[in-house]
Amino acid sequence: MSIIMVKRKKVSGWPVRNFLRSIPMKSLCLSTLAVVLLGLLVQAWVESEAIGGVAPTYKNGIINNLRTRVVWVQDMGDGRDVFAHGGNLRLMGLDTGDGQGERVILGTVGNYAKPLITPRGDRVVFTDRSRKKIYVVDWDGTGLRELFGGVGLAVWRDPRDGREWIYYGSEEGTNGEEHCPAVYRTLLDSPGLGELVWNRTRVSVNSFQLSADGRMGGGLFPWPDGGVAQLPNQSMKVYAKGCWTSFTSVQGKHFFWIFDGSHRNLTLVNLENEKKWQINISSAPGIRGHEVYHPKWSYDPRIMAMTGPYKVGSGANRIAGGGREVEIYIGRFNADFTAIESWWQVTKNDRGDFFPDVWVAPTEGVKQKKAKSSEVKKTSKEKPADSISSKVTKTKPVSAIPRKPAPRKTIKRLIVEARLTDLSAIPTPPDIAPYRRALLVNGYDIVRVISGSYRQKKIMAAHWVIEEGQVLKDAIREKGKTYRMVLERYDDHPELEGERLIMDSDEFKLTLFYELRK
């Protein structure tokens, strides 16, 4: 476990020296020993409580002293199997209640794609992509059994009767575009004929999640369209473009996020009022602004997991490069979900760790409050969640009624002449697959500010280099040459949220600008 040390105040030595002189030598030895032991205990307590200001420990869990379990896959090869396609993986786990730290659940090297902890926290569901079959195993590694063919998408517990369901499909596609033509579900402990959940669009494999009541599903429909579907097989709304969506419910309110193309920021959406905001998750201790991946909400809405840092190699596809430095991190949101208030580095080893899932023990006696009016109301014609019809419908997705757009805020524009100093390599279209468009970030020294205000000597600016799978003719730039650029803050262009953004520089603290086309 990675620890951020707490700074201690310096204490004057004079009172301590005078006190020691008044103590007999024998007593002094015993007293000194006691003080040393007490100091070690205090230090151990401080270290166990000191990550990001409020730190979890293996013993006490990471939120309100609740027991926490984490599962992931570990690459026993070169550390590059970020998408868990190969056969050189093992299934790993950590339980804050047993004091063992990182441990092996299934050590036989094979494929353990997308591990999912069951809602009760006692088992793990995973997919063997080589066999195209879904399996379940007890937390201690015993009781391994095959369920059926397909790929596991999500597990869910019906709050009314406690039964656990598995949502699954038949995987198609490659190279980051893996998807299921339809989503089905069946009982985990007594699988039967699958009930149709969704087939109005394709659904990407890696990030499908259910609301607490099972009536909504967040995901990519398919990549890069991140949205929320009303289940079973009703309407769907796209909120943004990107990857690695996640979905959670908080006392009847629903929250959704989508991961941006730079692989550093989450765009969160409150489904009640459709308000959006962004949270940077690449600033966690140990990440230092590099790309991260596999972000996912846990069973507790305050807790999320991710992997990183991704910094092997150079150019566009650092995620695909993986790396032995990639570890599992857990973050805790603040109460209003506007920031991550603390981080915990779960793993520390020389293997690539990918695809984390986190289970937090539920608080006894806590019930979900009734949902507010933002939830879809049940009509007399709708079927309950546990009686989803398996009849295939041919209707197209229904879009939500568009609201009147909010007035566009005034965007400040900056015109500069700047000398290119930090030149990033232009990726090839295969490098950015499955993306077909990409922006590239270069670093420039300011020569002259023509219009607007900018006080830094250096500036980072992104411009388009690939569109529709083709490198643009004006994408190439020369190091040392001065360019005249019309710029606006990158964050002032929400339409760029899901676009692939390539950045080789470590100048993460400088404001990023977007170069407008001429």
Image: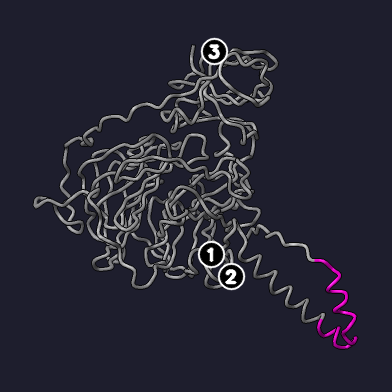
Relative image position of residue 73 (x, y in whole percent): 52, 54
Residue at 54% across / 26% down in the picture? 513
Nearer-the-camera pick, 182 or 452: 452
Task: Check whether the beta carbons of the residues at disc 3 and disc 2 lie within 8 A of each other.
Answer: no
What's the residue type where badge 3 is placed? Asp
Within the image, what quadrant is residue 320 found in? top right
Residue at 82% across / 80% down in the picture? 32
Query: Element type at marker 1?
Result: strand
Q: To which residue does mark 1 refer?
A: 94
Task: Check whether the beta carbons of the residues at disc 1 and disc 2 lie within 8 A of each other.
Answer: yes
Q: To which residue does mark 2 refer?
A: 100
Task: Check whether the beta carbons of the residues at disc 1 and disc 3 lie within 8 A of each other.
Answer: no
Residue 380 placement, left or right of 458: left
Q: CA distance from mark 3 to mark 2?
A: 56 Å
Q: The N terminus appears in which quarter of the rendering?
A: bottom right
Give the dominant element type of the magenta stretch: helix, strand or loop.
helix
Residue 474: mark: 3
Q: CA distance from mark 1 to mark 3?
A: 50 Å
Label located before the other in sequence (1 or 2): 1
Nearer-the-camera pick, 3 or 181: 3
Label located before the other in sequence (1 or 3): 1
Counting every numbered tag in the picture gives 3
Query: Element type at marker 3?
Result: loop
- Asked if one can make out residue 73 in the rendered structure from this viewpoint, the answer is no
Relative image position of residue 445 (x, y in whole percent): 68, 21
What's the residue type where badge 2 is placed? Gln
Q: Does the stretch in magenta take in 22?
A: yes
Query: What stretch of residues is rendered in magenta?
Result: 12-31
Relative image position of residue 461 (x, y in whole percent): 57, 24
